[in-house]
Image: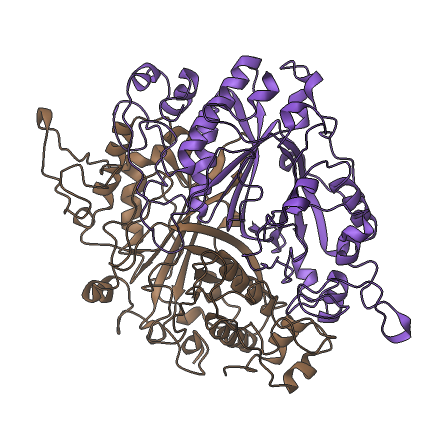
Chain colours: A purple, B brown
Amino acid sequence: MTTGGISRRGLFGLAGAGVAGAALGGGATYAATATLGNGSAVARTYPFRGLHQSGIVTPAQDRLHFAAFDVSDITRDELLELLADWTTAAERMTTGLGAGPYGAASGPYDAPPDDTGEALDLPPGGLTITFGFGPTLFDDRFGLAGRRPDALEELPHFPGDALEENRSGGDLCIQACSDDPQVAVHAIRNLSRIAFGRATLRWSQLGFGRTSSTTRAQTTPRNLFGFKDGTANLRAEDTTQVERHVWVNDGDGPAWMTGGSYLVARRIRMTIETWDRTSLREQERVIGRTKGVGAPLSGGEEFTPVDFSVTGRDDAPLIDPASHVSLAHPEHNGGATLLRRGYNFVDGNDQLGRLDAGLFFIAFQRDPRTQFVPIQLSLARNDAMNEYVRHVGSGVFAVPPGSRSGEPVGERLFA
Amino acid sequence: MTTGGISRRGLFGLAGAGVAGAALGGGATYAATATLGNGSAVARTYPFRGLHQSGIVTPAQDRLHFAAFDVSDITRDELLELLADWTTAAERMTTGLGAGPYGAASGPYDAPPDDTGEALDLPPGGLTITFGFGPTLFDDRFGLAGRRPDALEELPHFPGDALEENRSGGDLCIQACSDDPQVAVHAIRNLSRIAFGRATLRWSQLGFGRTSSTTRAQTTPRNLFGFKDGTANLRAEDTTQVERHVWVNDGDGPAWMTGGSYLVARRIRMTIETWDRTSLREQERVIGRTKGVGAPLSGGEEFTPVDFSVTGRDDAPLIDPASHVSLAHPEHNGGATLLRRGYNFVDGNDQLGRLDAGLFFIAFQRDPRTQFVPIQLSLARNDAMNEYVRHVGSGVFAVPPGSRSGEPVGERLFA
């Protein structure tokens, strides 16, 4: 299942008509060049297989390509075959190999290359590839309706939502993260090719400058408001908290999801031109932290616990109850929290010369109904930040557990 | 002219109404945190001042944010003041400082911060900021009509051009390159703010995975066709060639451009889904090189000179005369060549699920009339690659020489 394990149909997607047979016959591989590239690329790899999928508590890489797909008119068996082909190719690519056994640059010459080649000389840069299932996958097309976890329901409409159809939803999702954007793009491109005739790219999003740390070794990065983002994020080292808030536990729902998680994605456009003309005092009031070191306005340094009881002049609380840090805090959400793993984005500009920029929010959790949904409802109603953000894209996906050697990701859903 | 040198109007752009006076009064600066960031960021800096602008023969950084601006209804003096403000801020940012003297996170609290802050903890990552003037700047608005270099004329329509108005042209351009995309984005964002009321963002483009080496120390990167791109590019070390093909020489045209160069930008969309279903043989025929090591099809290794006279079966040339390498070669263009400095881009996908991806081509040259234009005319007519690319955006800009300490970039145009 490591090389040559892609189905005849998957090879057709890679290689085009008329050559799948030839490609199936060979066992040649090309060796990945795992030397250091120019600039930022690094040779770090993360194992694709395991109890959980990688790309969740994995130290957040610097770059993202996220893609949502709609499944075409295929059978249940063909859907499972697609997942098997994706699994095989993903495992190869995370080790630095090409998507298919023939790679990008070796025979058969009369067939399209198995791999598109743009990552040929690049190390994997910590590539992780994470697969998820959207609620629409559980309609009547594949006989999966009875297997939908209760936790996987469409998100409600939140006040202020301005969702665009072509940036929302999807039957399947793939999150590719790497320290090199070319590696992440290469992964999504080749998985899209493999899906040819079986699933179509619905929307995709590139991101840079991750906005959250997922391990204590990482310093807190900044979002495009210029503030540190993710200071209070869950960290991989907090295993008890991660077990409680991120992983689907045994008995939480259908067994096929045990060890999995739920991914919520939101494309949050920031009206940065407006923000940039707001006083530093107002910016810090909206966030509830200082812009420089990221300390809570109640005092201390970045990692000092937030104290909502501290008051200043006129007995007013130093941290505004409508601030983002207050409304998002577990203390004000019945203990609910999220593992955030988002990225900044800038996608050029709109016709008015405003940058199309913001935060591509990604969060993992054990159950969106008790975590993202109530937190976001509170934020959408009261957050002082709402004046400067607009949610324009959205998706929720069940991320199945990791797969054992030879097992397609998500296979247990079909068992 | 180093700190506090931004005009009252520029500070207004940074800081909003009512506080420019206060901001002008202070001399406080904040120290850049030039430690290593997470992941890829590096502390490398390039000098902003010099005989030539940086960002041309500078070793190509990994990431790009390119922006074109239209100048608003302002006077000639106000235009020069904008250039002076941009120069001051650009010089600061290339050393790792914030855009303005107060930075992102220190007083006056009732004013918007001078800097937006998202690069606050990041090293400059080799940031270069390069300014250019479009042909439209030389109309009758600023009394510059008589100063337009003959070499700066609108590009002709090339066969197959499918240019989009909102990805083409512009009175001014800024090329920001860094090894960290957040640093490049930060530069364009803050320069846009400084231009408030004086120039408006017309279009912008992000790029990653540079497609050309500009020094011999850099290995050749790959474009999204999966091929090495830029093997035969001019290199900074070839000073005689650079002097001959890149820099405007004394006597070439108006004195204010001596030491400058001309930048041509083309947004080249690749129909990668079609390309990906093309045989390896056909891909290599179209390019004229092997996909693996990038050797010319006439034989040898990557840097072996191309030999168009070598023939194979039936006396057919091994390198197709319609191949890209043949048509772009100086030998077939009267010796004309370019310093290429382009980047790959992926901007999500279109409604048909195709990736909006390709090459953001940037080239510097001494005179587009004898370099880019004839080469591109030949390519547009005959290049076998045309089946897989579409030029959708375009711009040509006069890049003035570097500036001396205290001198705004391009000031000699106004002298």
* B198, above or below A322, in the image: below
List the single residue furthest toward the right.
A314
* A208, above or below B21, in the image: above
Q: Answer with left or right where residue B330 lies relative to residue A240.
A: left
The image quarter containing residue A194 is top left
Nearer the observer, B227 or A147: A147
The image quarter containing residue A242 is top right
Position of the C terminus of chain B by quadrant: bottom left
Q: Answer with left or right where residue A71 lies relative to residue B52.
A: right
* Residue plotted at (18% across, 48% down): B303
* Residue plotted at (48% across, 71% down): B34
List the single residue furthest toward the front.
A240
* B176, above or below A408, in the image: below
Q: Position of residue A27 (x, y in %)?
A: 29, 22
Q: Position of residue A398 (x, y in %)?
A: 64, 31
Q: Is residue A349 visible?
A: yes
The image quarter containing residue A117 is top left
Q: Position of residue A116 (x, y in %)?
A: 36, 34
Nearer the observer, B316 or B334: B316
Q: Position of residue A87 (x, y in %)?
A: 47, 27
Nearer the observer, B6 or A318: A318
Nearer the observer, A192 or A46: A46
Q: Is residue B129 visible?
A: no
Badge count? 0
* Residue plotted at (22% across, 38% down): B289
Q: Answer with left or right where residue A211 lies relative to residue A390.
A: left
* A255, above or below A186, in the image: above
